[in-house]
Image (cartoon, grey):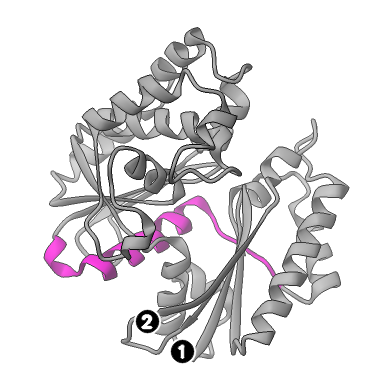
Amino acid sequence: MRLGVLDVGSNTVHLLVVDAHRGGHPTPMHSEKTVLRLAEQLNSRGELTKRGISTLVDAVESAKESAQRRGCEDVMAFATSAVREATNTEEVLATVAERTGVDLHVLTGADEAKLTFLAARRWYGWSAGRLLVLDIGGGSLEVAMGIDERPDLAESLPLGAGRITRTRFSDDPPKRSEIVATTAWLDDELSGLAKRIRKLGEPDRVVATSKTFRSLARLTGAAPSSAGPRVLRTLTATGLRQLISFITRMSSGDVAELEGVGASRAHQLVGGALVAEATMRALSLERLEICPWALREGVILRRLDLSNGEDQTALMTGRGRG
């Protein structure tokens, strides 16, 4: 079965095409993305602008046509924090559906965390024990923990790399005073999460997903993507602190020149690094592994788990049977 997943995020619209069957390993066949930075196209009233909606429609239509050309039997389309938090979400969804025929399903932050956790659980298996999963997106930080496929804790905090960059920094590179103030503010924001995590006990394995964590790991010495998904990649607290002391003095243009950093995300890498460091500090983590599967793979796995008769909302939130 050939499936497509269309992910409308804060930074990009990303289409992933896989060949998959229930109980099997999804094989990536095609991946393409369009950089939109939707979260930066919200006006003072919190609405996605007309221009933002228009560019989104074009990107969704292009991805739909690409999926059709590649023979996808089903395309699961979802949106995360940028569309979820827009004050005109219903208008955005209706316009996309009317002009493209694609129904975008808005995931809650908790659903994002649960689906990402499912992907990590399947990747590492039951031997991972109690699993703690972290994911930094453009708009939010997702955290999930548990010993089964459905986590005991699944939370989303408004601490995404792009959001931190937009709301906490005024210069490029950020002022030293902004770095210090943001670090202290993040510690306060994460203190409650740390208490809730501790109540669940110590994790047996800690993993992280997302482009932000992959870039940070690469910049601290992890293998490049060309080495393949099964190479062990880690991020240490010590390496991250050393990296932050380096990149906080660089402009985003200079950061974009570093190996493993995409030009479209370079401007928010410092924000993402501060969130990663604060999260590891709050949870007393010295080391974590980078998981190659994340939200999109979780959506695919959920689709394969459930019957064809389930609607997309049930498929992507896990609220259907199965």
Q: Residue 212: percent from the left, percent from the top?
A: 44, 44
* Front residue of this view, candidates 165 and 23: 165
Residue type, label 1 = Ser
Q: Residues within 10 Å of mark 1 (few under 14, many from 20)?
A: few
Q: Is residue 245 above or below residue 114?
A: above
Q: Residues within 10 Å of mark 2 (few under 14, many from 20)?
A: few
Residue 15 in sight:
no
Question: For the point 38% across and 58% down, which residue is it?
Answer: 225
Q: Residue 154: percent from the left, percent from the top?
A: 37, 51
For the residue labelled by badge 1, is the local secondary structure a helix, a strand or a loop? loop
Left or right placement of residue 92 versus residue 215 in this view: right
Left or right placement of residue 123 versus residue 272 in this view: left
Residue type, label 2 = Gly
**Circles 2, 1 touching at the beta carbon (< 8 Å):** yes
Question: For the point 14% across and 44% down, which residue is it?
Answer: 201
Q: Is residue 120 above or below residue 30?
A: above
Provide the residue span drawn in magenta. Answer: 103-128
Q: Quadrant of residue 108?
A: bottom right
Left or right placement of residue 281 versus residue 322 in this view: left
* Front residue of this view, candidates 217 and 168: 217
Q: Residue 143: percent from the left, percent from the top?
A: 36, 47
* Front residue of this view, candidates 4 and 305: 4
Residue 307 image label: 1
Dominant SS in magenta = helix
Can you identify the residue that label 2 sits on?
322
Residue at mark 2 to residue at mark 1: CA–CA distance: 8 Å
